Image (cartoon, helix red, strand yellow):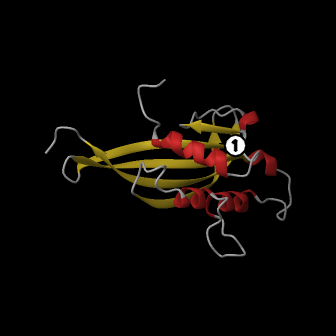
């Protein structure tokens, strides 16, 4: 038994494991370990980059957590393929913010769809904002060349501060 509640990063990893297509990702990391083993790709890294605390409603803190979810693929898998076969960029875009062609809504199988549908993270947060970015090629340690996309969330929550009026 832990002395601490699940972190927001842990909540996100649990939601992604349950809702992304099974077998799509080999590993989910809490943090970005940098030198990812090639055998662990494709993977997801959930990285908490900071928190800010403000005085909230009476007896509460208003906390904003900044979390980045990175989708990481091995770019070498596309080496030597024709333009029609080089689809990592499209794959990453669809995983992050894909749109369902039938409903024209954010796909429930995309990271954005999963986290916007479950944005309270089991009543841990009250609001979130989103920013999406893509990198063409990223060189990581151990001669690994990756193509990545990331979606950055700012999750807002109120937390009770006992004894504060």
Q: Is residue 90 above or below residue 121?
A: below
Q: Residue at x 65, y 44 (%)?
A: 17
- Pinpoint residue 119: horizontal percent, then vertical percent: 49, 57
Q: Residue at x 59, y 48 (%)?
A: 15
How many marks overall?
1
Give the image quarter of residue 139: top right
Q: Secondary structure at mark 1?
A: strand
Q: Position of residue 156 (x, y in %)?
A: 37, 53
Report if residue 119 is visible in the image. yes
Quick one: which residue is furthest to the left in this view? 165
- The answer, for residue 138, to whether it is visible in the render is no
The picture places residue 57, in percent across and down from the top left corner, at 22, 54
- For disc 1, the neighbor class at 10 Å (few under 14, some 14 to 19, many from 20) is some
State the residue in front, 111 or 149. 111
Quadrant of the image for the C terminus? top left
Closer to the camera in the image, 40 or 155: 155
Q: Nearer the viewer, residue 48 or 137?
A: 48
Q: Is residue 37 left or right of residue 51?
A: right
- Specify whether 132 is left or right of 110: left
Left or right of residue 64, residue 32 in this image? right
Residue with the most extreme top position:
1
Q: Relative to 160, does residue 126 appear above or below in the rendering?
A: below
**Point 80% across, 47% down: residue:** 77
Image position, residue 163 (x, y; %): 17, 38
Q: Residue at x 51, y 49 (%)?
A: 68
Residue 144 placement, left or right of 131:
right
* Residue on which disc 1 sits: 145
Image quadrant of residue 99?
Answer: bottom right
């Amino acid at each position: 038994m832990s002395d601490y509640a699940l972190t927001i990063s842990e909540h996100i990893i649990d939601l992604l494991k349950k809702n992304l297509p099974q077998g799509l990702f080999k590993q989910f990391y809490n943090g970005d370990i940098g030198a990812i083993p090639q055998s662990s790709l494709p993977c997801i890294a959930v990285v908490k980059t900071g928190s800010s605390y403000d005085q909230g409603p009476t007896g509460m803190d208003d906390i904003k957590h900044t979390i980045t979810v990175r989708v990481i693929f091995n770019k070498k898998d596309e080496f030597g393929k024709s333009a029609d076969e080089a689809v990592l960029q499209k794959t990453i875009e669809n995983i992050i913010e894909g749109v369902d062609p039938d409903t024209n809504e954010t796909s429930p199988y995309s990271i954005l769809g999963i986290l916007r549908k479950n944005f309270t993270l089991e009543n841990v947060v009250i609001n979130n904002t989103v920013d999406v970015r893509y990198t063409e090629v990223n060189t990581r340690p151990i001669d690994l060349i990756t193509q990545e996309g990331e979606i950055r969330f700012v999750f807002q929550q109120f937390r009770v501060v006992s004894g504060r009026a």
